[in-house]
Amino acid sequence: MLTRKTVGDTEPELAAMRRLNKVLARLPRFRIRHQATRFALQGLLKLGQLRGDAILARHGLKAEDKTVTVEGASVALRIIHARRPPKAVVLDIHGGAWVIGNAQMNDALNLGLIQACDVTVVSVDYRLAPATTVQGQIRDCLAAARWVLGPANPAFAGLPVVVVGESAGAHLATACLLELKAQPELLQRVCGALLYYGVYDLTGTPSVRNAGPDTLVLDGPGIVAALRQLTPGLTDDQRRAPPLSPLHGDLQGLPPALFVVGERDALIDDTLLMAQLWGEVTQAEVWVVREAVHGFIHFGVGQQVVQSAWAWIRQATR
């Protein structure tokens, strides 16, 4: 069953979104094909993370960076431990259009998540394109999920697990859940999925194909071409096949999910269509955030929405 609601509609929240959008309208849109832009953004991201461990330590948290190998596949992880024994584990898959980002980029959000929900957060440092394919990134995330959920990690045994993904991370999270159907003993430990403004059809949903030059954050007219660039050598039929395009997968057996997307996100149809299909087989909610753009949770707005999502996690892990 699907429940849909509009959120972020108080006057203070709307005013904050409108101020942000005015700023974003003056800034260039992100284009995957611009290699120099990708390198610059990745460099700025790492520069801003230099004191990340010290910030966590001030809040009594400790980050552990490690590489694990499961069934012959290795992947780097960033694990943030709380002071108290965790009530659950969150598998966090970052965004960044498959080409930028790292496991540390959600530390600020995950700090709040840990404090609100008493969880351990395991962030996946999956390889970026073009160093690997999108299929390779799915394999990285799957290896991380198998490590969190499987017998090789007794520290998490018996703890409920929630998968959280944002943008490209929401795509990888959903693809990973579809792949986990082959191991139902692991999938049944996942009690929920929190998915922020994901991409679920790599051939483009209607809102993607109709995105105009006024799209904020993303280069709307170039999204379809970017998706093709990320999956070279494939036909649209091959791009549409799951798990590459989770929208066309069999969702039976997947956990309850909360979807979050902004009204002004070019990817809004991906979320609405995915949530509709998800709700046909299990419990699903979709929150549409008034006037919000892609990536809004990183721009200092929508904090009430994020805190409500954390409340959803607390409920899912009881």
Image (cartoon, rainbow, N blue to C red):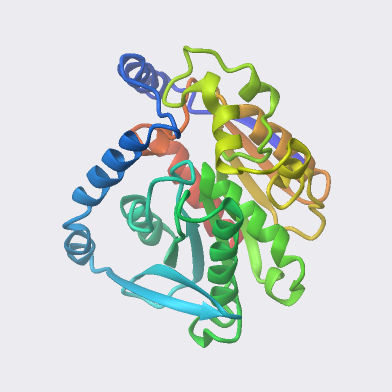
Residue 207: horizontal and vertical position, in percent? 64, 22
For the question of whether residue 264 can be seen, the reply is no
Residue 17: horizontal and vertical position, in percent? 39, 22
**254 with respect to 301 (left or right):** right
* Total residue callouts: 0
**206 with respect to 86 (left or right):** right
Q: Where's the N terminus, which quadrant?
A: top right
Residue 208: horizontal and vertical position, in percent? 62, 24
- Residue at image location 39% in from the left, 23% down from the top: 29
Q: Where's the C terminus, which quadrant?
A: bottom right
Picture quadrant of residue 205: top right
- Residue at image location 66% in from the left, 54% down from the top: 175
- Quick one: 233 or 62, which is closer to the camera? 233
Q: Is residue 224 above or below residue 275?
A: above
- Residue at image location 22% in from the left, 53% down from the top: 49
For the question of whether residue 247 can be seen, the reply is yes
- Quick one: 96 or 56, which is closer to the camera? 96
Q: Is residue 78 above or below residue 47?
A: below
- Residue at image location 38% in from the left, 61% down from the top: 114
Q: Is residue 309 above or below residue 221?
A: below
